Image (spheres, grey):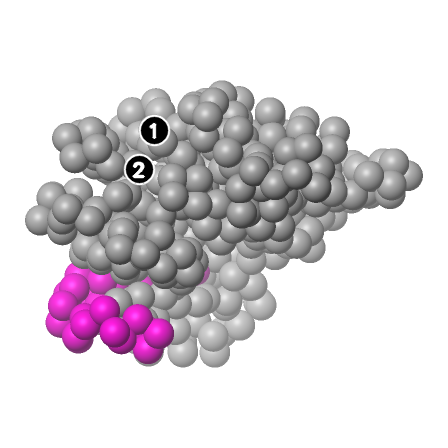
Amino acid sequence: MAIPLLDLKAQYATLREELNAALLRVVESQHFILGPEVEAFEQAVATYVQCQYGIGVSSGSDALLAALMAIGIGPGDEVITTPYSFFATAGAIVRLGAKPVFVDIEPQTYNIDPHLIAAAISPRTRAIIPVHLYGQMAVMEPIMALAAQHNLIVIEDAAQAIGAEEQGRRAGSIGHMGCFSFFPSKNLGGFGDGGMVTTNDPELAKKLRLLRSHGAEPKYYHQLIGGNFRLDAIQAAVLRVKLKYLDTWTTARQRNAARYRELLAAAGNPPVAPPLERPNVRHIYNQFVVRTPARDALMAQLKAQGIGCEVYYPLPLHLQACFATLGYQPGSLPESEAAAQETLAIPVYPELAEEQVAVVARYCHIR
């Protein structure tokens, strides 16, 4: 039984008529950049994530870049973040001439360890970017307390966490800004790239809208040096359809995750550990990541059975060649390095059938 890591065709099959109608609506309108579709989607997402404002942008990477630009991050500034994340988290910082300062992760959640952040703050620190990795929020209360104490901006990287909650508060609504990705593989994925920045600050919202359109207001009169970070109407129309089903899909992901836990535990002292789900959180399972020192053997075993799996992320950011000038060495951030060597994502998408979950679990043991 071939089981992909993600089956977007299965999702499309259930929504074909609605999605095709949405696409046709945009084509017939001939309004492809920003406009009513984008505005309606911005409002819908802002409401969903419990924020006042949503600013649609061209990708999750550009959401991070625009958020940093909105607070004037530049040369000489430092931004604290995690090394165990997708490249864009740190790439956006460096693109603006600032320096990422990496803080190690909690070994069981893979999110930044809030207890280590204070030691990384310097007079040059301007912001903190916690990443809500794999669909579970970082511990935000101590991060926000530190930010208030040191007058820092908090930008939540919620690219993998739309709808995730901590004590009833949603990802993207706690920090000064939240950044989302609608890359096709995300829980809420478009038919191409797309992203959004959310905020409760009207001044930041206004600035972000300027920045995404080359800083122009009105047209051809440039108040700021921005970029072309605009969201396509086609993506907004597709995502408006999908947003209606997001909570149903999240429930299905959670059901699959719970079933994996049961099956792995039933095997008796399994060598493969499931992800930790913290109390009082809503984990949306963008990925279901298992962990074992024999990760590569497990990956080979699953692939031999036609089961999709992938390593997120095989080399932490502090050890990437492009960041060598930052001076980090192997062993600098041991929890991130260990996670990169031991973790593996297995299928958890909503359309995954119960018998498929059972098959994956059956081979999630080192034999």
Vertical relation: 200 (above or below) 209: above
Query: CB under 8 Å between callouts 2 and 1?
Result: yes
- Residue 242 vs residue 234, the one in the foreground: 234
Viewer can see residue 263:
no
Q: Give me the residue at 40% from left, 56% from top.
A: 96
Q: Residue farthest to the left?
A: 119
Total count of labels: 2
Residue at 53% x, 72% y is 306
Residue 95 visible from this viewpoint: yes
Read off the magenta span: 320-346
Name the one closer to the observer, 7 or 226: 226
Write down the quadrant of residue 338 in the picture. bottom left
Measured as percent of width and height from the top left, residue 17 is found at: 82, 39
Element under label 1?
A: loop
Instruction: Give residue 174's mark.
Output: 1
Amino acid marked by disc 2: Val
Q: Quadrant of residue 43?
A: top right
**Residue position marked by numbered label 2 in the rendering:** 154
Q: Position of residue 247 (x, y in %)?
A: 53, 31
Image spot of residue 186 (x, y percent): 53, 49
Q: Is residue 326 magenta?
A: yes
Residue located at (56% from left, 63% from top): 4
Residue closer to the observer: 243 or 248: 243
| Few, some or many residues within 10 Å of mark 2 (<14, 14–19, 20+) | many
Residue 245 lies left or right of residue 101; in this view the side is right
Judge depth for marks 2 and 1 and give the one in front.
2
Q: Quadrant of residue 345?
A: bottom left
- For disc 1, the neighbor class at 10 Å (few under 14, some 14 to 19, many from 20) is many
Label 1 is placed on what type of residue?
Answer: Ile
Is residue 81 shown above or below 205?
A: below
Image quadrant in which the C terminus is located = bottom left
